[in-house]
Image (cartoon, rainbow, N blue to C red):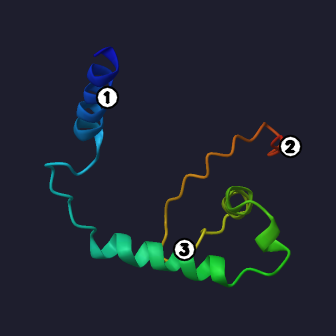
Amino acid sequence: MHRLQSTWLVAATLLVAIPGSGHAASPISDNVKVQIQALQDEKAKRTPVQKKISSHLLNAYKLRHGQTVAPGVPVFRTGVKLDGAGMTLVD
């Protein structure tokens, strides 16, 4: 009996937690679509060596040197934490 109750509890929790279950998704703006396409285009143009480097590091490098991550993408957060010298730990 306990096992059946646990199964129902898990099922009920999943139904409540599933995104979009009863909520309408808001449409993506045209500006966001253009920015996503620009990021995909930039990624497709990378050299074989650049493709082996984390996108986060490549984008942090670009931003540190005053470049945009991709045309039409004015703001971008990389999540890379730089020290005072502009360095980060890579493992």
Residue occupying the point 78% across, 37% down: 83
Residue 23 vs residue 6: left or right?
left
Expressed as whole percent of the image width and height from the top left, the position of residue 64 reads 71, 56
Q: Amino acid at mark 2?
A: Asp
User: Hey, what amino acid is under mark 3?
Assistant: Leu
Q: Which mark is residue 7?
A: 1
What residue sits 86% from the left and 74% below the top?
A: 49
Q: Earlier in the sequence, mark 2 or mark 1?
A: 1
| Mark identifier at residue 91 | 2
Residue displayed at 29% across by 44% down? 18
**Is 73 located above or below residue 23 in the figure?**
below
Left or right for 5, reference 22 = right
Q: Which residue is mark 3?
A: 39
Q: How many marks?
A: 3
- Work out whether residue 26 or residue 4 is closer to the camera in this orientation and state it: 4
> Going by the image, does 34 lie left or right of 48?
left
- As displayed, is residue 82 above or below residue 29? above
